[in-house]
Structures are given as C-alpha cells and as structure tokens.
Image (cartoon, helix red, strand yellow):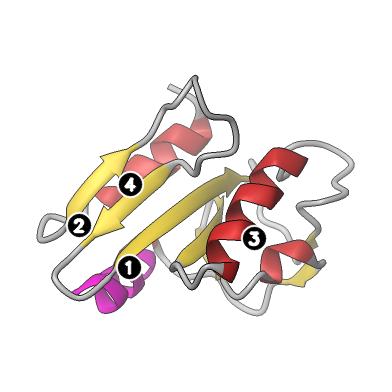
C-alpha cells in the first residue's frame, strides 16, 4: 500500500459517523480522492502526500511529486466556484495541512501540522 493511501485511510478511519466514499474513477480524470457527506454538508477532498515533513511546498510547481495536475486544478477550482466544499489535504509523516478557498493554487508555508485525528475532526466539523 502506498504512503498516500495509508495516510488517507488513517484519516478516514476516524469518520465513522458520516458517509465516506473513497473514489477511484478511471473514467473522469481530476476527480478528488474522497467524498464525505454528513447531515449538514458534503466535502470533496483531494489528498497529496510528502514522504518527509516540509516547511513549505507548491503543489503546482514541485521539484518532485506530489503535484496537482492541470485537470485536478480545473476540477477543484470549478467545483469551488460553484460553491461546493472542496479541500486539498497535504499529508506528511507527522501530520497534515488543509488547503481550502483555492489556497492549493499558491505556495504554502506550513505553520503547524494537524494530527490525523485533528484532520478528521475538521472534516466532521464541516459535515456534521
């Protein structure tokens, strides 16, 4: 199992009270990795993973992967512009950060990493 997949599962395992759909769509490129749905809201979430902790990153122009492809950028930005809840969660060995409101389109300075439980709690806060 790849590190990004393990990271996604380690967040989703804390989401027992909402609908979790891990997406693997080979027909439509750019669709995010997960869809979460609860009684209050739903969320489209793309996950990216760096194998080492970083102080900063740019998902559009990385020296190495992970990166957001142009198709992913278009899909995420289009759904955001429609008023949908769209996040990119960037994972690292010791935690992750949540990018929303198109902050995935610019370089990011990491202030602090959220634990996997804290990431799940933020998803629940939105959906429940």
Q: How crowded is mark 3: few (under 14 residues within 10 Å), some or many (20 or more)?
A: some
29 versus 88 height, above or below: above
| Mark sitting earlier along the chain (2/4) | 4
98 relative to 25, above or below: below
Q: Residue 114: where, in percent of width, then height?
A: 47, 70
The residue that label 1 is drawn on is 123
Dots 1, 2 in contact, CB < 8 A:
yes
Residue, far left: 17
In primary-sequence order, the first of circles 1 and 2 is 2
Task: Name the residue nearer the viewer: 1 or 75.
Answer: 75
Q: Identify residue for label 2.
A: 15
Q: Around disc 1, counting alpha carbons within 10 Å, would you say few (fewer than 14), some (14 to 19), or many (20 or more)?
A: many
- Which residue lies under the disc numbered 4? 10
Which SS does the magenta portion mostly show? helix
User: Label 1, label 2: how many angstroms apart (C-alpha)?
Assistant: 8 Å
Mark toward the viewer: 1 or 3: 3
Label drawn at residue 46:
none
Residue identified by numbered label 3: 77
- In the displayed structure, does residue 27 sit left or right of residue 54? left
Residues at marks 1 and 3 touching, judged by CB atoms closer than 8 Å: no
Residue at x 37% of width, y 61% of height: 43
Give how far apart the Cα atoms at labels 3 and 2 are: 25 Å
Q: What is the magenta range?
A: 117-128
The answer to whether residue 40 of the structure is visible from this angle is yes
CA separation in Å, label 4 and label 3: 26 Å
Relative to 16, residue 26 above or below: above
| Residues at discs 4 and 3 in contact (Cβ within 8 Å) | no
Find numbered disc 3 in the image and state the secondary structure of the residue it sits on. Answer: helix
Q: What element carries label 1?
A: helix
| Image marks 2 and 4: residues in contact by CB distance under 8 Å | no
Q: Which of marks 4 and 1 is nearer the N terminus?
A: 4
- The CA span between labels 2 and 4 is 10 Å
């Amino acid at each position: 199992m790849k590190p990004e997949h393990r990271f996604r599962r380690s967040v989703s395992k804390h989401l027992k009270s909402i609908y979790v759909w891990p997406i693997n769509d080979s027909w439509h490129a750019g669709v995010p990795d997960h869809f979460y749905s609860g009684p209050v809201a739903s969320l489209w979430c793309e996950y990216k993973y760096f194998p080492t902790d970083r102080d900063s990153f740019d998902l559009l122009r990385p020296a190495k992967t992970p990166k957001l492809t142009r198709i992913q950028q278009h899909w995420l930005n289009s759904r955001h512009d429609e008023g949908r809840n769209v996040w990119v969660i960037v994972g690292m060995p010791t935690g992750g950060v949540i990018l929303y409101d198109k902050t995935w389109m610019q370089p990011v300075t990491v202030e602090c990493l959220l634990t996997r439980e804290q990431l799940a709690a933020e998803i629940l806060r939105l959906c429940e």
